[in-house]
Image (cartoon, rainbow, N blue to C red):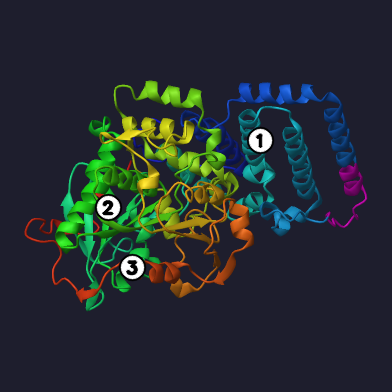
């Protein structure tokens, strides 16, 4: 996706609401759709229709049956509308949250909603019945759902009674502000999901006290100040995903995973990945291992004086950590006493909904695009992830921000979600081909990294594996696929909720639950059948597990770093504050 030149949002003079509605519709299609298409997140309509037609011709009799049922359902809907009482009593409103407002109960708008839901069900049934090979059918179902979500009558001003009512009540002021919000978001290339003026990294996000004790072209390494008089002898090195900023693990004091670990007596070191500029576009996967993960482990050893550290990786940070550990073991080095992998994929057999984007043509195109270096813009990845849950992460904000002219609520997690990070193109294309596309990491010796063949079976230290049951980025059964690959004693834990909320579940809030099962049968479903649900956060369970491998209690360090690695600047450091514009 190309970065646009920043321009002020245009001013709109509204003599009548109709003009504003027309302009809003024009901008929604011409502006927002154009941006999304440039990011390669919208479906190839020609390809979709070709697949759709192929599916119908495979079983014309079933298609005709479903088509006839669709017409009968619509006829019944028309009859229900005709039979509604003269005083405007509506049909039973749909349970869909998009249509819960009382305005949707008026007969005309209720009909729009019901008709849309009937059509959506018809399309879903047709695509489900299509006889196509697995990947083609997956793409067809995904793109059909994208189209269904986009065509909801709630998303457009002429068919959203809530927006029309609000425009009348505000004399068009809601439309004026909505147009300004839309123009600003089109210019920045993302739909605003939170009030970004409410947060600032270093002011009310990423504020756990610490300092930067090391930096290179790839990362800064933070050391956090102790909160206890004594600490565990072995420090804890955290490796966050390099496609996002590290502070997802250090949002605010009451939901900071970092603070939780420090309060439990761990000296925590955090890798803060650099938001890569264009000149770093040739950086490789091996560079991230050598100059990122392994360098962080070495510095933490030096500063703490411990022969071994504990290490933690989150998402792709966990994949990087596992690869680094395999390289170290191939070199006969053993600097890590235990490893924690949070929502991490090592076996990429089933990559969930992301697989719809990643096939040979996509990877080959990216290899050609980044043949001479360059960076993958973080905004492109952000749009891709948002499109996986468009009804949660795109369309509600279109309605709120543009149709109603409101500012989204302040939400720290969504602020982080929009704070994207660029990746080197060379590193990205290697990652796509050898993990997502070809799944080479699971095969011993198939890949050579940092000059040595890697075998995950050599990662033989105790490991804690956390998956999230509703994770659509790292499906929990895929995360369970790490169990037969790693060589050490394992603890597998399944958290409730999704990729982020399953991890960021602070103990003090006592929300949700998690499942434990000390046995590790071959099948993930068998593990779940024998698992026991535990109330609240998994954080204390992990803390108890980690304490076994953290060494004796020693006096907390009086100052960060040492003579070789003096303090450079206060946390959170410069790297994490570099935002894409």
Of the 4 image quadrants, the one containing the N terminus is top left
From where the camera sits, is residue 493 visible? yes
State the separation of the CA atoms marked 1 and 3: 42 Å
- 523 or 146: which is nearer to us? 523
Which structural element holds mark 1?
Answer: helix
What x and y, as percent, mark residue 252?
Answer: 36, 65
Which structural element holds mark 3?
Answer: helix
Q: Residues within 10 Å of mark 1 (few under 14, many from 20)?
A: many
Q: Residues within 10 Å of mark 2 (few under 14, many from 20)?
A: many
Q: Residues within 10 Å of mark 3 (few under 14, many from 20)?
A: many
82 drawn magenta: yes
- 276 or 306: which is nearer to us? 306
Which structural element holds mark 2?
Answer: strand
| Mark sitting earlier along the chain (1/3) | 1
| Mark sitting earlier along the chain (3/2) | 3
| Mark sitting earlier along the chain (2/1) | 1
Of the 4 image quadrants, the one containing the C terminus is top left
From where the camera sits, is residue 244 visible? no
**Magenta segment:** 76-91
Picture residue at 14% right of the left edge, 72% below the top = 558
Tag 1 residue: 141
What x and y, as percent, mark residue 472?
Answer: 55, 48
Tag 3 residue: 261
Picture residue at 59% right of the left edge, 51% below the top = 523
Quick check: 72 above or below 305? above
Quick check: 280 above or below 95? above
Tag 2 residue: 271
């Amino acid at each position: 996706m190309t970065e646009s030149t920043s321009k002020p949002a245009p001013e709109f003079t509204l003599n009548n609401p109709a003009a504003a509605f027309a302009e809003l519709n024009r901008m929604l299609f011409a502006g927002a759709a154009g941006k999304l298409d440039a990011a390669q997140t919208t479906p190839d309509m020609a390809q979709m229709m070709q697949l759709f037609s192929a599916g119908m011709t495979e079983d014309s009799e079933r298609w005709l049956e479903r088509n006839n049922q669709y017409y009968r359902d619509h006829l019944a809907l028309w009859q229900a509308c005709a039979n509604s009482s003269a005083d405007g009593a509506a049909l039973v409103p749909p349970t869909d949250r998009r249509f819960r407002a009382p305005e949707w109960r008026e007969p005309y708008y209720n009909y729009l909603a019901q008709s849309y839901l009937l059509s959506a069900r018809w399309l879903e049934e047709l695509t489900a019945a299509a006889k196509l090979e697995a990947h083609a059918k997956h793409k067809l179902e995904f793109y059909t759902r994208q189209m269904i979500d986009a065509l909801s009558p709630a998303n457009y001003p002429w068919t959203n009674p809530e927006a029309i009512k609000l425009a009348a009540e505000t004399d068009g002021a809601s439309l004026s502000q909505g147009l300004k919000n839309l123009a600003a978001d089109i210019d920045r290339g993302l739909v605003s999901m939170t009030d970004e003026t409410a947060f600032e990294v270093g002011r009310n996000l990423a504020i756990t006290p610490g300092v930067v004790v090391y930096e290179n072209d790839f990362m800064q390494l933070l050391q956090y100040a102790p909160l206890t008089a004594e600490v565990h002898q072995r420090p804890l090195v955290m490796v966050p995903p390099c496609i996002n900023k590290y502070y997802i693990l250090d949002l605010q004091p009451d939901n900071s995973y970092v603070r939780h670990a420090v309060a439990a007596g761990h000296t925590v070191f955090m890798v803060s990945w650099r938001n890569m500029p264009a000149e770093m576009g040739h950086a490789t996967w091996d560079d991230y291992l050598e100059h990122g993960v392994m360098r962080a482990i070495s510095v933490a050893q030096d500063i703490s004086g411990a022969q071994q550290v504990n290490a933690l990786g989150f998402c792709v940070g966990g994949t990087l950590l596992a690869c680094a550990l395999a390289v170290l073991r191939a070199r006969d080095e053993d600097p890590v006493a235990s490893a924690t992998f949070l929502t991490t994929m090592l076996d990429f057999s089933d990559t969930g909904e992301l697989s719809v984007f990643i096939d040979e043509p996509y990877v080959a195109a990216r290899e050609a695009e980044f043949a001479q270096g360059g960076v993958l813009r973080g905004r492109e990845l952000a749009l891709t992830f948002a499109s996986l849950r468009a009804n949660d992460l795109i369309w509600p904000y279109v309605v709120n921000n543009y149709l109603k002219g409101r500012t989204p609520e302040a939400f720290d997690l969504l602020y982080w979600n929009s704070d994207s990070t660029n990746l080197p193109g060379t590193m990205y294309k290697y990652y796509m081909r050898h993990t997502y596309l070809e799944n080479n990491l699971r095969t011993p010796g198939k890949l050579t990294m940092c000059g040595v063949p890697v075998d995950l079976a050599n990662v033989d230290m105790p490991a804690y594996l956390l998956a999230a049951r509703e994770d659509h980025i790292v499906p929990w059964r895929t995360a369970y696929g790490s169990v037969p690959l790693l060589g050490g004693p394992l603890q597998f834990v399944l958290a409730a909720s999704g990729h982020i909320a399953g991890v960021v579940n602070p103990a003090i809030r006592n929300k949700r639950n998690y499942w434990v099962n000390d046995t590790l049968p071959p099948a993930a479903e068998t593990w779940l059948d024998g698992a026991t649900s535990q109330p609240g956060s998994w954080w204390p369970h992990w803390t108890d597990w980690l304490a076994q491998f953290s060494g004796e209690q020693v006096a907390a360090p009086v100052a960060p770093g040492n003579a070789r690695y003096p303090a450079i600047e206060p946390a959170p450091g410069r790297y994490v504050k570099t935002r894409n514009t």
